[in-house]
Amino acid sequence: MNISLVQSELYWEDIDKNLSNFDQKLDKIGQTDLIILPEMFSTGFSMNAAAVAETMDGSAVNWMRQTAAKKQCAITGSLILKEDGKFFNRLIFMRPDGSFDQYDKKHLFTMAKEEETYSAGTEKIIVDYLGWKICPLICYDLRFPIWNRNLEDYDLAIYVANWPDRRSYHWRSLLTARAIENQCYVAAVNRVGTDGKDLYYSGHSSLIDPAGEILYQKADVEDIQQFDISKEHLIDVRSRLPFLKDRDNF
């Protein structure tokens, strides 16, 4: 499967400008199976949900649907969405035929008081796509290994994030740990640049293989990279080092 990681700056609380910016960036991507964007890619990591939240019929979700159809690939990232009077930090996994899966962020970032604005998700999901089992997660979820634990034999974990540079060592270390302990590929996309609260993000978007080898990691600049990931390599790692059979089931 070919995946495309899009490390980008974000325009603060400006949905139209962000979508236009990604239109230009994605035009540079050739044939691919999956495009991964950052957390809250249409707004930045804003707590101003009342002003910028959209519905599932809004411009950002429709943009994902149109872009997936145009590029004939899946596209994923998280958005600020409103549903039933509540706000969610929701990841959408949009397929080229317009079908999608959604995941609401389980672990809300209390240091930014995210839980005061957003409602937490309760369900971990596994996405089936092109013969791959994919576990999509959002930013702060990375810190909680039980939530990440590979009980479903998933092949690829995706992390979309707005993870500040001041804790980038944690980001890089935990991504590698998750790949090793879950014997899966890890594809992680973080933003770069400075947000509306003057927080700097260094990116360090990454691709890590099931043995923990860092295949890609980029800091401080916008970057788009495409990679082929191999199911055969995944199976080989798990067969040579069959650690998952001894995992705890709690």
Image: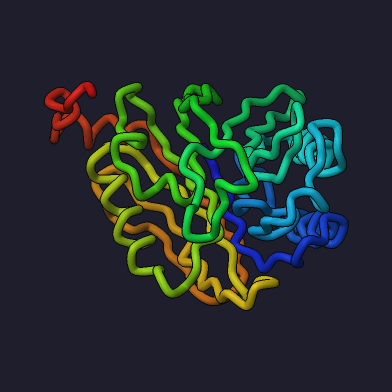
Q: Is residue 233 visible?
A: no
Q: Residue at x 33, y 58 (%)?
A: 214
Residue at image coords 76%, 25%:
98
Q: Is residue 68 above or below residue 14?
A: above
Q: Is residue 209 above or below residue 55?
A: below
Q: Is residue 94 left or right of residue 238?
A: right
Left/right placement of residue 126 relative to residue 232 reads: right
Spot occupied by residue 175 in the image (x, y as percentages of width and height): 35, 53
Seen from the viewer's position, the closer of residues 115 and 68 is 115
Q: Return the x and y of residue 78 as percentages of the image width and height.
A: 64, 44
Q: Is residue 156 left or right of residue 13?
A: left
Residue 156, picture quadrant = top left
Please indicate, yes or no, whether residue 12 appears anywhere in the rendered image. yes
Residue 18: where, in percent of width, then height?
79, 59
Q: Which residue is found at the position 68% from the left and 58% from the top?
A: 46
Find residue 147 and report its image quarter: top left
> How far across and down, in percent of the image, does residue 27 sit?
78, 55
Residue at 30 percent across and 45 percent down: it is: 179
Q: Nearer the viewer, residue 213 or 58?
A: 58
Quadrant housing the C terminus: top left
